[in-house]
Amino acid sequence: MKILVFIKQVPDTINVRIDPKTGNLDRTGLKGVINPFDNNALEAALKIKEETGAAITVVSMGPPQTEESLRIALAMGCDEAVILCAKELGGADTLATGYTLASAVKKIGDYDLLLFGRHAVDADTGQCGPIVAEFLNLPQITFATSIKVEENHVICERDFDDYIQKVKVKLPAVVTVCAEINEPRYPSPLGIMKAMKKPLITWTHEDMGCDTERIGKNGSPSIVREIFEPEHTQKDTIMFSGETDEIAKSIVDLLEQQHLI
Amino acid sequence: MDKSLYKGIWIFAEQKEGILNGTPLELLAKAIELKKINGDEITALLLGNHVEPLADTLISYGADQVIVIDHPVLKEYKTIPYTEATVKMIKKYKPSIFLFGATTIGRDLAPRIMARLGTGLTADCLDLKLEKDGTLVQTKPSYGGNIMCTITIPDHRPQMSTVRPKVFTAIHAEPGRTGKIVLENIDVTEDESTQVLSVSPKETNGEPIDKAEIIVAGGRGIKAKEELALLEELAKLIGGRVAVSRPLVDEKWMTHEDQIGQSGNTVKARFILNIGISGAVQYIVGMQNSDCIVTINKNPTADIFHISSYGAVADYSELLPAIITEIKKRK
């Protein structure tokens, strides 16, 4: 069994600001980490590996420093890592990213299960899993909250808004996972040592035979016109003050006005 | 691509077990606003089995046309047949804009369709504006709502978006409003690779949080899990339910189903009481459309006061028992 896990390196905090001088995201002091939901995808793969002896390849598209996150994934227990890295791949929207990831999967060739986090915490789209599934013509299960591999099937419970849906899908398949699915492990010191010797390969768009019209900015139908910090409408807040009992009375008066009691 | 061939505003009329969830009606409300700019017709695409009766509802909420594909294969939502049916309709009718709710189904289906068509899809939109030349300007949050982006899809059609539920408000229905209902008889291939084994309602603490009208919400300031009982008691007295911000889900005191915020649920309550919640941007985005927002916090500079209608600087562990006593006294 062969599992591919797709990870994205994201800033270690989502509390980011816009640099008023440049109008761009202020990246000073931001450290790169594995997208939190992708850690859940890695953990899901590692659990299946423990049960079935599956081999895990971890794949990421990004700038050269993405290697740091891939090394961590190797230290957690993945077997090999592939970084998809070339300046031509930059500026990609989800369609171009999905095409590039699918090209990598085709080059890898053999695979049974493709795992993604439900979304990345920086761009907040959650589209790459389904897009890759579409390009490879595979079935998909999104928002999985449990996962089990049984012979040539994967069985998941998934978050289906007000419902839990239990789905069984034939492998090969794409699954995107929620945080509830597991507690991701940390790499052990031994794992970190072993990771240094594991293969970490770099592929460019040329290595994967990508159509240059479909990658990076060229291959992206979506354009970011503007980024800004949200303004929250400031309300004229009425503050209740006084002793605890007086505040309580004011709040209960309000509850009465609102017909809640 | 000849963009002039693409016309019309489409919405995906999501239904489960023959019931429209709220989002198609919210999408129709937004579509009505967009229609004012260029007069484009509004079409609702309705997929399912024995769902035709829902078409009139969609018309009464603003659809000019409802395209219905009624097929046994579409009875239960499955990604691949729904993709196939929707793509066939897009290729036939060529809409300029296609809106989906950012629900599980919308987020599962829309990217698949977008990839098959090779167009753009903006996720989880909070606002949409239409420019005279037909360009849809989509505003979406990034970094959990700390940053907003406006995104356009200038040279591809349809321009696709998923729209966050509870951001737009459905119009009042206009019973008897007339519109066109088109029944499309097409082949839809069963997806043999996927089997739905079961669908069961989630166990939650009462009603689903996004439908709650009255909410008592707790956050990081709650000192111990046992103290949630105070919130529960108050919620019960005012006919509401308890919700939490992310820190208490991280502590595992409550579940993701009870969480308000970016990766959780968006609420639009009639009344919400925030207790010990400082107001991280994800939380504020998740509840700021509520009608009456009341905040109790020890810290007078907490951000959440800015978006509250009423506030009190107080220690909840003293104030809540006093409120509970006062309510009981008056009942």
Image: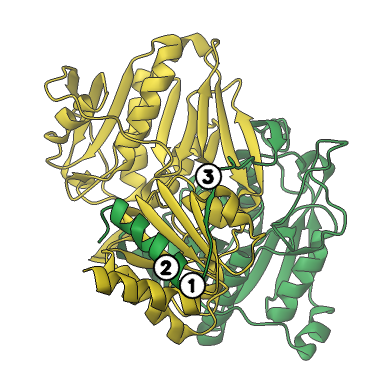
Image quadrant in which you'd find residue A49:
bottom right
Dots 1 and 2: beta carbons under 8 Å? yes
**Chain letter, colour yellow in render:** B
Q: Colour of chain A?
A: green
Disc 2 designates what residue?
A248
Disc number for residue A135: 3
Badge 1 sits on which subunit? A
The kind of residue tagged 1 is Thr
Q: Is residue A122 above or below residue B25?
A: below
Viewer-proximal residue among A5 and B96: B96
Taking B300 as reference, is B6 left or right? left
Crowding at dot 1, Cα within 10 Å, few <14 / some 14-19 / many 20+, comes out as: many
Mark positioned earlier in the residue sequence (1 or 3): 3
Closer to us: mark 3 or mark 2? Answer: 2
Residue B124 image point, x, y percent: 50, 43
Disc 1 designates what residue?
A244
User: Which quadrant holds the C terminus of chain B?
Assistant: bottom left
Residue B24 image point, x, y percent: 31, 37
Q: Report how many numbered discs are placed on residues in the image.
A: 3
Q: Are marks 1 and 2 on the same chain?
A: yes
Q: Judging from the image, what secondary structure is the residue with disc 3 in?
A: helix
Residue B103 image point, x, y percent: 39, 49
Disc number for residue B65: none
The kind of residue tagged 3 is Phe
Badge 2 sits on which subunit? A
Residue at mark 1 to residue at mark 3: CA–CA distance: 62 Å
